[in-house]
Amino acid sequence: MRQIFQDQMKELEIEMISTGGLLEQAIDAAVKALTEENFEKIQEVRHLEEAVDHAEKKIENLCLRLITLQQPVAGDMRRISAALKMITDMERIGDQAADIADLSQRLIDHGVYRHAKHLNQMAEVTSDMVSSAIDAYVNNDLELAKKVMRTDDVVDELFVNVKDDLITLIRQSDQQIESAVDLLMVAKYFERIGDHAVNIAEWVDYSINGDIEPQK
Amino acid sequence: MTKRIFRSIFFTALGVLLASAVLILGILYQYFSQELENEVHNQAVYLSAGVDALGVSYLEEIEEPEDGTRITLIAADGTVLYDNEADPASMENHAKREEVVEAKNNGIGESSRYSATLSEQTYYYALLLENGDVLRLSSTQDSSFALVLGMIYPFVAILMLTLAVSGFLAWAIARRIVQPLNEMNLDHPEEIDTYEELTPLLTRMSQQNHQIDEQLQEIAQRQQEFVTITENMSEGLLVIDAHTNVLSCNNAALQMLGSVSLPKQGSALALNRSEAFRTAVSESLEGNHSLQMLRLHGHSNQVLANPVWKDDQVIGAVLVLLDVTEREERESLRREFTANVSHELKTPLTTISGFAELLAAGMVRSEDVSHFGQNIYDEAQRLINLVVDIIHLSQLDEVSEPQMTSVDLSVVASSVLDRIRPVAEKQQITVKTALDSAVVMGNASILDEMIFNLCDNAIKYNRKQGMLTVSTGFENGHAYVSVKDNGIGIPKSDQERVFERFYRVDKSHSRAIGGTGLGLSIVKHGAIYHHATISLESELGKGTTVKVSF
């Protein structure tokens, strides 16, 4: 019985890591679709998003099966419930990457991406946050998780900067208002990705320490 | 073991005790019955003497016996004359009673009867008196049982006490026996002499300990060797089991996967989550060979994954990681070079073929023939120069046995300048020299080639009435040759690449200037051949200085 439990826990870990990998790939592709104006990447993001959705179902099933059939306690229970919560955030991140890719298809046509100077930096910081959050989960690294939580402020600040950039763009000419609005959406999606990464980091904290921080 | 010994001792004691108790009680019962009968006999003898002397009145006068003995006097005809427990008149004739009949015949009679009404065993003893009457005494045997019963209580108390004592003793003895066994130091079984019976076992154990020690040492040594080998490999080596747990991993592998330390959970996927690595792991664990390219931090790593089979089942996988960054770079350079060479060779050939075609078709006016011929000649010369340069380069590429002699750079430089001066004059370029003797060990023809190419470039990429300064000498203990011009210069972004084969800064004008694009490449390879370093200082529009230090 114990062996089955251990095997299933292992399977959960592997699934979580793989999904983390898919997610990093999806964000990377979404960022490339936007910054390198690469059409192929848009398709890639869509496929990856589907893969992440699929993984979410699988991990949910696995977690529920573990909880109902194996009745885990203490640390194991925390790790499983953290995984169950994290996968929801991961799936949302996947969705947002797909949304960014969808928007970037329109933005490539207009070629206005360059006007939002801070967007690049934002993309870099948020994809870093996601990577770090997954790293923190994989290596049980509390320090890294805390760092991800702190980085959220940087992303929020960058979002304000991007907004300012776009306001300047709109003031300069009314030709590109639509693109500017799209870019604002992209920035918001990145900001949301950052929030989800923080959520993941908080669940890592929970799975290590067992205390639930008040959700903002 | 303690429990077992305790139990065996305790239950043996208990069994023995109970058995002896039952036996003793049985014997006692027998004994008491006997005693009772004896007492009745004595009483009867005593009473018969009294009755013989005094008659019935004696019986009526004596006190009631306290032990409940019943006394009956029966006349010869069987009529009861006296009974101490019942009215003799109401009693039936006793002449037919077994003990009475026996007493009449033998003088003494006894019998034992079970009374169903009273559910007791009664013992009767009858004695024939001198006058023919019979004196009968009877006693219920339950009084002997009561005696034994009276013994039971002290007996049980003694039993309890003995059991408690034997329990404690059993516990103490069991501990005593087991304690030395518990205190045995099994690391050194040969030093133990607690129980003689254990000696063969301990000897065997000692031998096995030795064997295990030796084997462990051997394993540790093997492990050490393995670690030393794998750690010094430049290839990454990773061994995983069927659940992706890392069994073995060297530093190179960790580095190539971009991980600092082994993950706590042991899954190889925790080292790297990239698609290439995941695919390699999953494919190999499915039993297929997998070859993936993992790109990380500007490095290209080839991941070769092979499943490990045992009894038709994949029990793990071996992953080898190779850093192929350099190889990829070299390959791309070679591809570029091939493409460039064919392009550079094709251009003059196309021109030659074009002019030749026109000439052959007779479409050229006779006064233009020499002009066309000149063109063909020029292009052919270009082609020859190109081929010569390529030959030089490939000679330098092949690290042949260096033919080193002592060469004075100033002598080489002045010989180069003698040859090149006419070209410079044609472009109205002033040549300045500062040639101090600088002797190095080197190959004269290669050095000549290097300096020639540097000067050639300085003239080609100069402007009208420009200047060319060539200096040789010693600086900081190193011989150097420096070629300086005040020509068009090289942009910062291109300075890295000008030493590459066929690289041109300004691709559009290169045809007018001529040259093969191989000059600086030859200089670079010459410098490598001589273990010299090249420094390039250039500013766009102001000029270039190339310095080779030996």
Image (tube, rainbow, N blue to C red):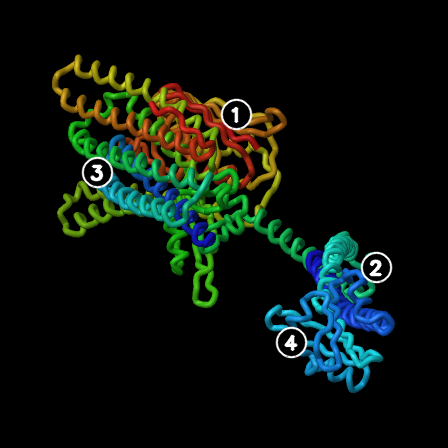
Confirm whether residue B387 shows in the render. no
Say whether marks 1 and 3 touch (CB < 8 Å). no
To which quarter of the image does residue B54 belong? bottom right
Disc number for residue B471: 1
Residue tagged 3: A39
Q: CA distance from mark 1 to mark 3?
A: 56 Å
Residue lying at 32% horizontally and 36% vertically, measured from the top left: A90
Q: Amino acid at mark 4?
A: Glu
Q: Chain of mark 2?
A: B
Q: Amino acid at mark 2?
A: Asp
Q: Is residue A179 visible?
A: yes
> What distance separates the C-alpha of mark 3 from that of mark 2?
84 Å
Q: Are marks 1 and 2 on the same chain?
A: yes
| Spatial CA span between label 4 and label 1 | 170 Å
Secondary structure state at the residue bearing disc 3: helix
Check disc 3 and give the amino acid type.
Answer: Phe
Residue under label 2, please give it.
Answer: B193
Q: Are marks 4 and 1 on the same chain?
A: yes
Relative to B235, residue B311 above or below: below
**In the rendered image of this protein, does residue B4 appear above or below residue B416?**
below
Question: Chain for mark 1?
Answer: B
Q: Earlier in the sequence, mark 2 or mark 4?
A: 4
For disc 3, the neighbor class at 10 Å (few under 14, some 14 to 19, many from 20) is some
Q: CA distance from mark 2 to mark 4?
A: 86 Å
Where is mark 4, residue-wise? B92
